[in-house]
Image (spheres, grey):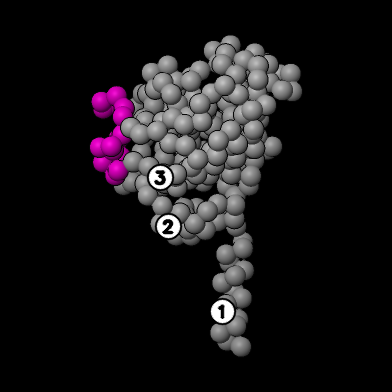
């Protein structure tokens, strides 16, 4: 009975929800077990592409001093990316996938938005600009981002034209890029930002992965960025 009690207690604790940092709890509801997954970047960022001096790492946490993205040096397709991020007051950043041009990346990539939805600035914008949205194109089902200073966990699955975003244990965004055949209007009739004129249905589904830097004047912090990808 004693062993059974401890076993049931462990199950109850595991089912209670996401703890802050999957280093201690690698499997959280809605997220994969990433213990065996490789890091997206080496600890010293020696395999990453970024502007000199902008991105730094301290105690496993990455951050940027400018609005400059950090990129992989290889292309990826059919992958799942898992990471933790922490916002500050007013943070606006993003996870960038399928980038075929890392200089002019905005019309040539897909951005999974990261934002401080709790701030006055970003709480009032269109839902397609809020955290876990496919920026400018598809709003999340709900806002699931934590308050500034707390760690969030995000899993992005990119399988061809199918994109799925899990934020803090909840599947909040699911997109079929094939439905986005217009560069001006989303399928629901809402406006696409004018600086993103390429229909998603025509974008490549293989490209570089990036993390956006210190955009809109507020910092962003990343850690435990891991990937499972097609060889």
Residue 48 inside the magenta-drawn segment = yes
Q: Main secondary structure of the magenta part?
A: loop
Write the residue at 58% across / 26% down.
135
Query: Which dot, 1 or 3, sits closer to the camera?
Result: 3
Q: Which mark is residue 35?
A: 2
Label 1, on which residue? 6
Viewer can see residue 179: yes
Q: Mark 2 or mark 1, which has the lower sequence index?
A: 1
10 Å neighbourhood of mark 2: few (<14), some, or many (≥20)? few
10 Å neighbourhood of mark 1: few (<14), some, or many (≥20)? few
Q: Mark 2 or mark 3, which has the lower sequence index?
A: 2
* Percent of width and height locating residue 120: 60, 26
Quadrant of the frame with the C terminus: top left
For the residues bearing labels 2 and 3, Cβ distance under 8 angstroms: no
Left or right of 57? Residue 93 is right
Q: Image height check: is 163 above or below 103? A: below
Q: Mark 1 or mark 3, which has the lower sequence index?
A: 1
Secondary structure under tag 1 reads helix
Query: Which dot, 2 or 3, sits closer to the camera?
Result: 3
Label 3, on which residue? 231
Residue 190 lies in quadrant: top right
Residue 7 inside the magenta-drawn segment = no
Distance, label 2 to label 1, CA atoms, is: 24 Å
- Looking at the image, the residue that sits furthest to the right is 188
* Percent of width and height locating residue 16: 61, 61
């Amino acid at each position: 009975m004693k062993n059974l009690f401890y076993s049931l207690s462990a199950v109850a604790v595991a089912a209670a929800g996401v703890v802050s940092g999957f280093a201690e709890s690698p499997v959280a509801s809605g997220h994969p077990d990433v213990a065996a997954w490789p890091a997206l970047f080496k600890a010293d960022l020696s395999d990453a592409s970024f502007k000199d001096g902008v991105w730094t790492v301290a105690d496993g946490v990455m951050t940027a001093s400018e609005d400059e993205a950090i990129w992989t040096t290889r292309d990826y397709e059919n992958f799942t990316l898992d990471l933790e991020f922490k916002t500050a007051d007013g943070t606006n950043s993003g996870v960038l996938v399928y980038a075929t041009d890392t200089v002019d990346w905005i019309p040539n990539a897909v951005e999974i938005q990261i934002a401080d939805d709790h701030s006055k600035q970003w709480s009032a914008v269109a839902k397609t600009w809020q955290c876990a949205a496919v920026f400018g194109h598809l709003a999340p089902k709900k806002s699931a981002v934590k308050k500034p200073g707390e760690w969030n966990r995000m899993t992005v699955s990119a399988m061809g034209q199918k994109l799925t975003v899990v934020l803090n244990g909840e599947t909040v965004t699911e997109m079929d890029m094939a439905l986005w055949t217009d560069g001006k209007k989303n399928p629901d009739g809402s406006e696409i930002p004018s600086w993103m004129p390429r229909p998603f249905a025509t974008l490549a589904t293989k490209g570089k992965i990036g993390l956006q830097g210190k955009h809109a004047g507020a910092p962003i912090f990343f850690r435990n960025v891991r990937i499972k990808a097609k060889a």
